[in-house]
Image (cartoon, coloured by chain):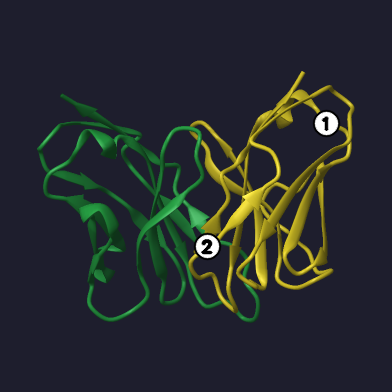
Amino acid sequence: AQSVTQPDIHITVSEGASLELRCNYSYGATPYLFWYVQSPGQGLQLLLKYFSGDTLVQGIKGFEAEFKRSQSSFNLRKPSVHWSDAAEYFCAVGGLGGGGADGLTFGKGTHLIIQP
Amino acid sequence: DVKVTQSSRYLVKRTGEKVFLECVQDMDHENMFWYRQDPGLGLRLIYFSYDVKMKEKGDIPEGYSVSREKKERFSLILESASTNQTSMYLCASSHGQGNTEAFFGQGTRLTVV
């Protein structure tokens, strides 16, 4: 069965500092990987996705993620965080199923706190 | 711009009531999903549908049912609401085969009292 682990429940980062959020996945085939962000009381917004090709993926709001197959990881990074980045971040895994779709599998999320 | 719309942002219902949560997407997507989000548990899949009138159970279907009479609309039904169904409910849709990018609605925060 597929699964996603986000080891950090909370992370606190100073404004302007760099950020890395960890994500490890388990998936039996070639995975599709996603990072979503959720602001308080809102739905999920896609930050970036990896389907194939270049393992370093650029997303919106200055985020990037690197797919490392050997480590089953898809960590999210940002060189300099802004106060507006405070939110909940979810990593998810999916793939090409055999007809139709049965939904992405999400990690439990990492709550990002930005210190002034 | 793609859009998934959930009919209510906030709902308060009484224990035992029948509750309908509605979701509409305007992207002509084949797949639609209902997730439940609880603190510390992340998103858990309740039901999904990959075609009109088709439905499949997700990870936590107990106490819920769904209806998809039209391609653009996917309804989640709580037959007899209970307090442990107090949660944030998120609808999503995606295109085609496989578990590709999902687009989410704004969520419905349901409180059962």
B77 horizontally vs A60: left or right: right
What subunit carries mark 2? B
Q: Residue at 17% across / 44% down in the picture?
A: A19
Q: Position of residue B23 (x, y in %)?
A: 70, 52
B73 horizontally vs A21: left or right: right
A71 horizontally vs B107: left or right: left
Q: Mark 2 highlights which residue? A: B102
> Image quarter for residue B47?
bottom right
What subunit carries mark 1? B
Query: Tag 2: residue type?
Result: Ala
Q: Is residue A38 above or below residue B80?
A: below
Q: Is residue A25 above or below residue B50?
A: above
B60 horizontally vs A9: left or right: right
Query: Tag 1: residue type?
Result: Ala
Q: Residue at 75% across / 69% down in the picture?
A: B71
* Location of the N terminus of chain A (image quadrant): bottom right
Q: Nearer the viewer, mark 2 or mark 1?
A: 2
Rounded to the nearest angstrom, the CA distance separating label 2 from label 1 is 27 Å
Earlier-in-chain disc, 2 versus 1: 1
Q: What is the crowding at mark 2: few (fewer than 14 residues within 10 Å), some, or many (at least 20)?
A: many
Callout 2 secondary element = loop
Q: Position of residue A84 (x, y in %)?
A: 27, 36
* Location of the C terminus of chain A (image quadrant): top left
Callout 1 secondary element = loop
Q: Residue at 65% across / 68% down in the picture?
A: B31
Q: Position of residue B32 (x, y in %)?
A: 66, 62
Q: What is the crowding at mark 1: few (fewer than 14 residues within 10 Å), some, or many (at least 20)?
A: many
Q: Mark 1 highlights which residue? A: B81
Residue furthest to the front: B1
Chain A rendered in what hue? green
Q: Are marks 2 and 1 in contact (CB under 8 Å)?
A: no
Chain B rendered in what hue? yellow
